[in-house]
């Protein structure tokens, strides 16, 4: 870390108005609704390439950063005026005054470091889901967004949809009645080479030659050093818990977003994970199949909720009730909110909610549906929502205050899935009360040169 980065960090820290909870830096006041933003993009391959495209229209792409030379060179062809870097720390050191906002689309384990580095310099941030890799990081990002006065957004596009707004409006209008039971599921995971969850031939994975286009040390970032294996990068890191958060961590931010928001769930106080006998189960890698049951306490006038996540099965083990009027559930993924009056179903994302009632009742309901009380922002447009919020001095719906809480719920479930059995979680004190040896995973150790955010705790 260069001295100039450290000195700027100290300047920001000293000048932020911590007692007020918000810090509006002078540079943030210069963006008017008609100005183009100067945007830097960290991670420009795969999903990062899509995010780059979505923020480039009507804005200036001034910097591109990726540890994979192939992705970086391809992006540079499309944005020849942007300066290129393989280390985001050097990018910020060289271009701090030229950047207004940053998009981060790196593997999960490097989200936090890149996002904190950006916020400490007063940059607005858009971060791919899941927001961070452990719960301490999530809570620190939430504090930091306020402390540094930036506009934050997690990229779970479903939170901008018409569907998720309808779900909350219907629940708030008592269409479902009391909801005490929620089910969500994802189908069979593919563990073949080239897919998101490639499984190595052995554990620990054998050493492969590092490709000449990849800076392996920078790719590891804060994670413990280890030999390179092609199952890690560039695509299939999600299945390894040191880098990703498995299918649950990846998809909870989509599939569980609607019930989390509508029911105001917060953090679970207990989570139980069951991995069936015969399923592949290794502490460092996601299981083939699992069932994860989240228990949430009563919240104000809302009853306790049991939410069950079914993963890796050809058919989810959910009893279909005769009154639902369906024969089977979509094996690829979906979500059920079971109410005392009616039950609601969606796909793996919340775009098209439907009540499980007769076709006549459904048609009558749509003709006289509850009022639309939640502002609409553009279906599946989280990038536009974030950019508009920067220019309008507002906050998008999946800002870090909301996104950190949603991701925290998922991460407690991931911990249970990883280690099995019951996790009793004390959210207030950030403790696993029945297995204190797991507390180290609530704030994971990092390598030298990658520590961020301790000044906020």
Image (tube, rainbow, N blue to C red):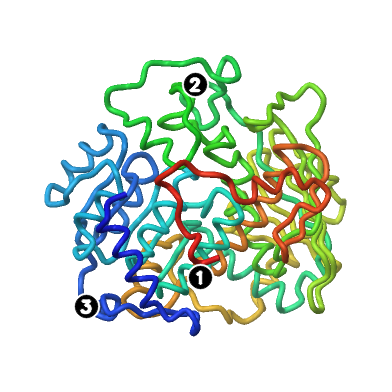
Q: Is residue 327 above or below residue 224?
A: below
Circle 2: is it few (<14), some (14-19), or many (20+) Cα within 10 Å? some
Q: As rendered, which of 9 and 268 lies closer to the eye?
A: 9
Q: Is residue 163 above or below residue 251?
A: below
Q: Is residue 300 above or below residue 260?
A: below
Tag of residue 193: 2
Residue tagged 1: 397
Q: As rendered, which of 30 and 299 lies closer to the eye?
A: 30
Quadrant in which the C terminus appears: bottom right
Q: Are the residues tagged 1 and 2 within 8 Å (C-beta)? A: no
Mark found first going from the N terminus, 3 or 2: 3
Q: Secondary structure at mark 3?
A: loop
Q: From the viewer's perspective, is 80 left or right of 447?
A: left
Q: Secondary structure at mark 2?
A: loop
Alpha carbon separation for disc pair 3 and 2: 46 Å
Q: Quadrant of residue 55?
A: bottom left
């Amino acid at each position: 870390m260069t001295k100039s980065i450290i000195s700027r960090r100290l300047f920001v820290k000293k000048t932020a108005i911590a007692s007020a909870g918000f810090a509006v830096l002078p540079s943030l006041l210069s963006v008017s609704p008609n100005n183009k933003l100067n945007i830097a993009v960290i991670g420009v391959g795969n999903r990062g390439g899509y995010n780059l495209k979505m923020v480039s229209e009507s804005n200036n792409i001034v910097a591109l950063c990726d540890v994979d030379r192939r992705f970086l060179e391809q992006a540079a062809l499309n944005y020849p005026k942007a300066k290129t870097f393989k280390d985001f720390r050097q990018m910020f050191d060289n271009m701090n005054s030229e950047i207004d906002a940053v998009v981060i689309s790196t593997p999960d384990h490097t989200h936090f470091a890149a996002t904190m580095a950006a916020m400490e310099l007063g940059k607005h941030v858009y971060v791919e889901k899941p927001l961070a890799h452990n719960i301490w990081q999530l809570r620190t990002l939430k504090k930091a967004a306020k402390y540094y006065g930036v506009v934050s957004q997690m990229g779970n596009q479903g939170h901008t949809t018409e569907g998720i707004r309808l779900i909350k409006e219907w629940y708030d209008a008592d269409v479902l009645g009391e909801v005490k039971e929620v089910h969500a599921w994802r189908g069979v995971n593919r563990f073949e080479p080239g897919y998101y969850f490639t499984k190595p031939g052995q554990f620990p994975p054998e050493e492969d030659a590092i490709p000449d286009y990849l800076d392996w040390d920078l790719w590891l970032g804060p994670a413990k050093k280890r030999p390179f294996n092609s199952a890690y990068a560039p695509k299939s890191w999600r299945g390894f818990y040191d880098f990703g958060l498995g299918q649950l961590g990846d998809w909870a931010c989509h599939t569980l977003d609607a019930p989390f928001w509508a029911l105001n769930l917060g953090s679970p106080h207990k989570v139980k994970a069951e991995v069936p006998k015969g399923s592949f189960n290794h502490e460092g890698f996601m299981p083939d199949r699992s069932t994860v049951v989240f228990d949430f306490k009563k919240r104000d006038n809302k009853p306790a909720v049991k939410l069950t996540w079914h993963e890796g099965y050809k058919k989810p083990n959910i009893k279909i009730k005769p009154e639902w009027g369906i024969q089977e559930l979509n094996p690829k993924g979906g979500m059920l909110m079971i109410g005392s009056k009616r039950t609601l179903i969606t796909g793996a994302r919340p775009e098209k909610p439907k009540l499980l009632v007769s076709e006549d009742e459904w048609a009558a309901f749509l003709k006289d549906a509850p009022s639309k009380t939640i502002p609409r922002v553009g279906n599946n447009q989280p990038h536009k929502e974030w950019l508009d919020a920067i220019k309008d001095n507002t906050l998008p719906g999946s800002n870090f205050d909301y996104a950190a809480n949603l991701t925290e719920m998922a991460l407690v479930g991931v911990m249970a899935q990883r280690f099995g059995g019951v996790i009793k979680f004390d959210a207030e004190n950030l403790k696993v009360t029945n297995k204190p040896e797991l507390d180290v995973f609530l704030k994971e150790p990092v390598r030298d040169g990658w520590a961020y955010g301790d000044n906020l705790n």
